[in-house]
Image (tube, helix red, strand yellow):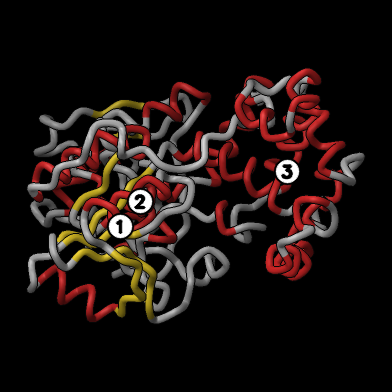
Amino acid sequence: MVRDYTMSTVCSGHRAVLACLVIGTFAISLSNVIIGHLAYNLSSLYQPEEFNRGLSTFERITNLDGEIIYDGEYISHILDGELPFPVNNNLQRLKFRPGSLPLSSAQSLQKCYVNLTHYEYQVSNKTVMLASVSDTHKLIYRNIPKSSSSTARHAMKDFFDGNDRRVKHDELELAVHQLDYALISFVRDPLNRFYSSFDESFFRLGPWMGSGPIVADKPRVKKWYFENKYKVEKYPYLYEGLPTIGHFRKVYCPPDELSISPLACNDVPSIENGTLAHRFERFVRDYDGREPFDVHMNLQVSNLVWGVTGNPLPVTKLYNATEADKGWLDIAHEKGVHIPDGQLTHGRRITRRFNVSKVSDATKRKICRLMALDYC
């Protein structure tokens, strides 16, 4: 498995970002990593003139920069060893159209490797990982924050007799490869997840977590804030003019709702006029994606690899978090489990506080690059 590489992604504008999710359950997620993997493998360069022979059945297009982009079928043949990797003296990535790789998301993941030096703050280096395990149904769920994780843990506990455990690498490999356990997880459109992750992380590390009514009876939350607030100090503009939770709520919560109850603000659309969105955009411009200021902003793939090696977990299937209920009903059907109507969805339903409609296409493209490992 390759130990180092650089990344690129082919994205432009919101449509191109969403195009990465062509196959229903986020199929071919993470295949941008594959691009890097292929690029480094054998230290070779793709030269189109060397591939004209015998490749007429594979679709090729040329983008505005004059780069050759292949249909993902050609890439999959290389990954499966059916075609040799092109050999040359230089180094360049093989690129293909998003949505064209004929592999499931779990299959794509097995071709990937994460550079632990580059992403040392994203991936835990512990020798065990937290998972929900059901021995009754031979099912293991790997948690990914902000990807329907609350619903998943609820389902595992209440319907599949699961419980949270710390699992070692060898134990997980044994369970999947020899004991017929299924290892599953849920993944989400990286752009929308980044919005939600920032929104929650912004709240969790606001100055109102150092003092005030929110932490008056939560000493552990307060302690965590003081241990981690240095991570946002490099972005001093984030909380300018927002010293308390009251100041913050006035930016996004309708006055009538705020006068009833602060909690009512969580259930109504934000009235934010761009104040928060502009700070978000400035943050995206300054952020390099390597050191998140909160765990909720970690890449999804960072939860799907071993922190000691960077190699992928033996994931059996990845489901679409935007259709989590359907995913769990499908799992229940396979396992012979009955989930009563209306008893599945669980978790926080909080309206996003900053106005996403104010976010520019340039910012979305930057997010696409930052989330390259989570994209196809």
* Residue behind mark 1: 157
Instruction: Determine the secondary structure under disc 1.
Output: helix
State the CA–CA distance, disc 1 to disc 3: 38 Å
- Above-or-below relation of 361 to 9: above
What is the count of numbered marks? 3
Q: Name the residue rendered at 32%, 52% in the picture.
A: 34
- Above-or-below relation of 256 to 263: above
Depth order, front residue of 261/247 = 261
* Residue behind mark 2: 154
Q: Name the residue rendered at 70%, 46% in the picture.
A: 202
Task: Report the quarter where the C terminus lies.
Answer: top left
The type of residue carrying mark 2 is His
Percent across and percent down for residue 303 are 41, 61
Residue 173 sits in quarter = bottom left
* First in sequence: mark 2 vs mark 3: 2
The type of residue carrying mark 3 is Phe
In this image, 322 relative to 145: left or right?
left
